[in-house]
Image (cartoon, rainbow, N blue to C red):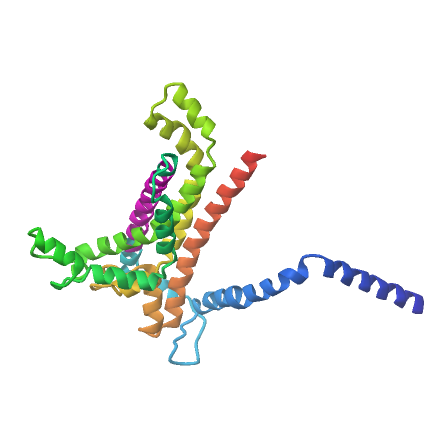
Amino acid sequence: MNKKGNAVSVQKLSFLKSLSRGPVPWLAPLGIVLLLLFVYPTFEVLRYSFTDASILRNTYNYTLKSYSNIFSNPQTYEVLWITLVFVFFSVLFQTLLGLVTALAVDKGEELHLKGTVFIRVIILLSWAIPGIIIGIIWGFLYNETPTGILASFFRRIGWTTVTFLTNPHSALVCVIVANIWRGSAQSMILSYAGLKTIPKEMLEAGQIDGAGAWQRFLRIIMPSLFPVISTNVILNTILTFNTFDMVMSLSGGGPGRATEVLAMTSYFSIFRLHNLGRGSAYAVTLLFINACMAAVYFYILKKRGDNNL
């Protein structure tokens, strides 16, 4: 028995030694943080979505009424439509503007123009500004009083009736424009990094073969940038679906519900209507959309990795 016990002790010690030399001690703190800050809150939101819980009482019952209520409510589909329009046009113009800016900066460096470094720094600074601050800044720009920046400019050129965030038809457009400005920085950085990976010899060979600038762009630059652009589109889509802070500080979802996106609907359901179950159901719906986009993102990464083998 003693020999057997000693053998078991030796095996335990060797196992602990091998464990301590591996990645587990280094990954354990990160795993604990992920469990406490991401996995557990996500599980709780998922659990509350199957209840009729309210933040005003401690008791609740498990039920599917939260999901049946949100999907039978016509306002849910209005919010989904607003969110889809907001995401589509934001991501489209973020990608285009980021690509154009990256091409301009890259061409400026090729021609040794001054100011390209300054432009990159400004773009990085705009990327680092929190969403709430961006909403406040654009709120000043959209101020419709005579002292408003854009309102004053339009009045000087003869446009006397100026409405931005108070008009339901123009409010969503104004919020999309602000979000395009916010997200173009990431698109520019990724596109710029992709441009730097294109060998100059390929572009020079195309120029020698008689390909013009537009042909080189379509046949050399765009195919080389396609993996970067596709990744950029998916990441921007996920970020835009989750946009809350900028819209909240800029328009508050108004006028009415003209700029209310899905993340704000979840917030309003919980903290204004005190309906924790319904708000969690909206959050789970948003989580499902993000999970689908993340699956597409990992599929593209896997496909790209398989092509590189």
Q: Nearer the viewer, residue 240 or 157?
A: 157
Q: Residue at x 39, y 23 (%)?
A: 207
Report if residue 102 lies within the magenta region.
Answer: yes
Image height of 61 relative to 225, above or below: below
Question: Between 272 and 297, which is closer to the camera in this rendering?
Answer: 297
User: Which quadrant would residue 101 be assigned to in this image?
Assistant: top left
Give coordinates of residue 292: x percent, y percent.
44, 50
Mainly helix, strand or loop, the magenta region? helix
Q: Position of residue 187 (x, y in %)?
A: 38, 46
* Residue 87 lies in the magenta-colored region: yes
Query: Is residue 230 something that shows in the picture?
Result: no
- Front residue (pair 170, 73): 170
Q: Which residue is drawn at the image coordinates 43% and 54% (left, top)?
A: 290
| Quadrant where the image shows the N terminus | bottom right
Q: Is residue 237 left or right of residue 166?
A: right
The residue that appears at 88% across and 63% down in the rendered structure is 7
Compared across the picture, whether 103 is left or right of 147 comes to right
Quadrant in the picture for residue 75: bottom left
Q: Residue at x 11, y 63 (%)?
A: 146
Q: Residue furthest top?
A: 209
Q: In terms of depth relative to the viewer, which is nearer, 30 or 107?
A: 107
- Residue 60 sits above or below residue 200 on the image: below
The boundaries of the magenta stretch are 82-107
Q: What is the count of numbered marks?
A: 0
Residue 178 picture location, percent across and down? 27, 55
